[in-house]
Amino acid sequence: MEKIKSFTIDHDIHKVGFYLSGVANNIYTYDLRFKTPNGGDYMDNAAMHTVEHLFATAVRNSTQKGNVVYFGPMGCRTGFYLLMFGCSAEETKALVIDCIKKCLELNEIPGNSRKECGNYLEHDLEGAKMLLEDYLTVIM
């Protein structure tokens, strides 16, 4: 089988940051890297899950909501993928910064009931905000 693009990145030199990792059919895949790959410090599942709920809600309520294809965590717990239709890196980075700021203003976790979430008991709002604050200082 062909090796997928994300496995061709040298994770030993990849750092925390915001990266355009691919474009196909006018869908831009962005790597929102919160933690250094193979660095021994990974996102806690509960905090990562909460970031997913916060950011997905913020970005899908943004001015670019019609261009959002997907937002979700990396299995390695070092970051998230954001897929956008036809949005440049410059405008997407500005969108990410704006959405993080909106996430930091939230005092409740969107979609955090048994009916809305498949693992509603595993969340950490404080931990999620710490991850978002740390990431914001890196990408600003």
Image (spheres, rainbow, N blue to C red):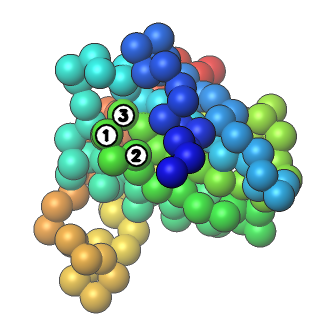
User: Residue at the location (60% across, 28% down)?
Assistant: 18
Position of the C terminus, as image quadrant, is: top right
Going by the numbered disc 3, the residue's amino acid type is Thr
Q: Write the residue at 34% across / 62% down.
A: 108
Give the Cα distance between marks 2 and 1: 5 Å
Can the viewer see residue 115? Answer: yes
Q: CA distance from mark 1 to mark 3?
A: 4 Å
Q: Which image quadrant for residue 39?
A: top left
What amino acid type should be assigned to the residue bearing mark 1?
A: Arg
Residue with the most extreme bottom position: 115
| Residue at x 30%, y 77% (from the top left corner) | 117
Measured in 3D between alpha carbons, the distance from the residue under mark 3 to the one under mark 2, in whole angstroms, is: 6 Å
Residue 130 is situated, as x and y percent measured from the top left of the image, at 32, 33
Q: How far across and down, in percent of the image, does residue 23 sit? A: 76, 45
Q: Please report contact status of discs 1 and 3: CB closer than 8 Å, yes or no.
A: yes
139 lies left or right of 107: right
Q: Residues within 10 Å of mark 3 (few under 14, many from 20)?
A: many
**Which residue is the extreme one toward the front?**
1
Crowdedness near tag 2: few (<14), some (14–19) or many (≥20) residues, C-alpha within 10 Å: some
Are discs 3 and 2 less than 8 Å apart at CB?
yes
**Residue at image point 31% right, 40% down:** 77
Tag 1 secondary structure: loop
Label 3 sits on residue: 78
Q: Which residue is mark 2?
A: 74
Q: Nearer the viewer, residue 41 or 102?
A: 41
Residue 31 lies left or right of residue 126; in this view the side is right
Is residue 43 left or right of 58 when viewed as pictured? left
User: Of the numbered discs in the image, which one, if any, rests on residue 77?
Assistant: 1
**Label 3 SS:** loop
Marks 2 & 1, CB-CB < 8 Å contact: yes
Q: Secondary structure at mark 2?
A: loop
